[in-house]
Amino acid sequence: MTPESPAPAPTPAAQVRALSLIRHPRLWLLPTLLAVVLAFLLSLLYMGGIVSPNKHLHHLPIALVDSDRGDLGPQITDALKKAPGDQADWRVLTRAQAQDELDSGKVYGALVIPADFTARTRALATTGATARPTLTVLTNPGKGSLGSSLASRISTTAAQQASQTIGKQLTASAGANANATTRLLLADPVHIATEVGHPIGDHSGIGLTAFYYALLLVLAGFMGGNVIHSGVDGALGYADIEMGPLHTRRPTIHVNRTQTLLLKMLMTAGITLLSSSLVMLACVAILGIDATHLPLLWAFSYCATLAVGLGVLAINAAFGGIGQLVAMFVFIVLGLPSSGTTVPLQAVPGFYRFLSHFEPMRQLGDGVRAILYFDARGDAGLTRSWLMIALGLALALLFGFTMTRYYDRKGHKRFTPQPE
C-alpha cells in the first residue's frame, strides 16, 4: 500500500490593506452617520441649556421682607409685585419665614426692608437726618453661584429703582429750600447692602461641590455598570477580551439573558459598596470638601450610584451593542443641562425643565445639595431625591428583567458561532 501523502498546509489568508478597504462607501456609512449626528446632538443639548439664562429666566423665587412701620415699605412691595415682567417670583414673607426658606434652599435670595426704613428716609429731608436708610440684599450661595448671582442682580436692581423713585418724591417735597448737596443726597437716598443670607463653607466650591459630587456619583454608576457588563460578558465567553495586543475568547458558559442580568446586578450591588465609598473618601477625606451628615452622605452615595449602575445594565440588556450610547444620553447628555445645579431650572428652556422632572442628575443633585448645604433637610429636596432613587431602582429592575425575559421566551440566543 502506498502511504498517504500528508494533507497540504492551509494557505494563509491574504492580508487586506487599509487603503483597499477605505474606498468602500458602505464602510463609511454607519460610523459617519453616528459620529456626526452624535456631535450635532451633543452640541445642541449641552449648549442649549446654558447659552442664554437671562432670556429664559422666569419666576426665580426671591423672598421679599417688608418690616417697615411706615408707608414706603408697602409702596416698594406693591411696586415689585405689580412690576412688568416675570423674571422674579417675589414671595412676601416675614423675616423668620424668609430665613427658613433661605436655609431650606427654597429661595435664591431675599430683599429686606427694615422696620425704620420710612422714618430714616423721611428724616433725610429734615435737619434730623443721621444716616441713609438701607435695603439689604441677601444671597444664597448654596443654590449655586449663578442662581445666587441672578437673584442678587434682580434684588439690587429693584432696590436701585425704589431708591430713585423715593428720591424723586423727596426732592419734590424739599422744593427750592434744599441746597445742591442735599439734592444730590435726596436723588438717590437709599444705601444697598449685600449680605450672605445662608452661609456655606469655604471648601464648597462657591456652591458647586454639590453639582460635581452628584456628577461623580452618576459617572461612577455609569462607568461601573458598563465595566461590569463588558467584564461579565467576556468572562462568560459572550464577548472577546482584548488588552493591547492580547486577545482571548473564553469558552462560552450557556446562561440565558435573565440569569446573566441577575448576575451583573448582584455584582454591581457589591462593587458599588467600594466605588461609592472611594468617591466619598476622595472628596471628603483627601480633598477636604465641606460635608456634614457623613453616614447619610455615604448611604445616599451608595444608593444613588447603585440606581445609575442598575439602570445602565438594564439599558445594555435591552439595547445590546448601542446600549452604552443610549445610557450615555439618558444619564449624562440629557442629565447635565437639566440638573438645575449649575444653571437654575428657572433660567433654562422649557424642554430642560420638562426633563428635570425625571432625569437622574437633577434628582441626585438636589439630594447632595440638601445634605452638603442645607443641613440634610427633607424639604430642601432630600425627600424627593430618596423617592426618585427608589423609583429609579424599581424601574431599572422592572425594565431590565422584562426585556431579558421577553428575549429568552422568544428564543433569542446571545451567541452565534462565526465562520472562520
Image (cartoon, rainbow, N blue to C red):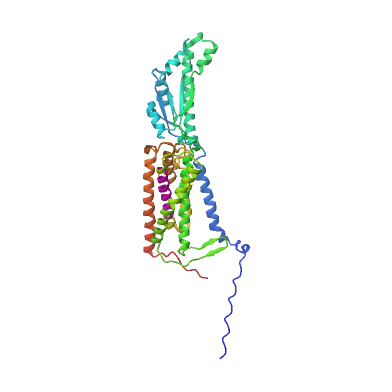
Given the current orientation, which residue lies at the most extreme bottom position? Answer: 1
Q: Where is residue 370 in the image (x, y as percent from the top left)?
A: 41, 39
Q: Is residue 311 magenta-colored?
A: yes
Q: Residue furthest top?
A: 177
The front one of 139 and 351 is 139
Query: Residue 125 location, x and y as percent?
Result: 47, 12
For the stretch drawn in magenta, the main secondary structure is helix
Q: Which quadrant is home to the N terminus? A: bottom right
Up-down relation of residue 318 to residue 42 (above or below): below
Q: Above or below — where is 391 with respect to 56?
A: below
Q: Which of 326 and 266 is in front in this view?
A: 266
- Nearer to the camera, 32 or 50: 50
247 left or right, relative to 258: right
Comparing 282 with 146, the one in front is: 282
Q: Is residue 137 above or below residue 18?
A: above
Q: Residue at x 52, y 51 (%)?
A: 37
Q: Give the range drawn in magenta.
A: 296-313
Q: Identify the residue at image location x=39%, y=47%.
A: 389
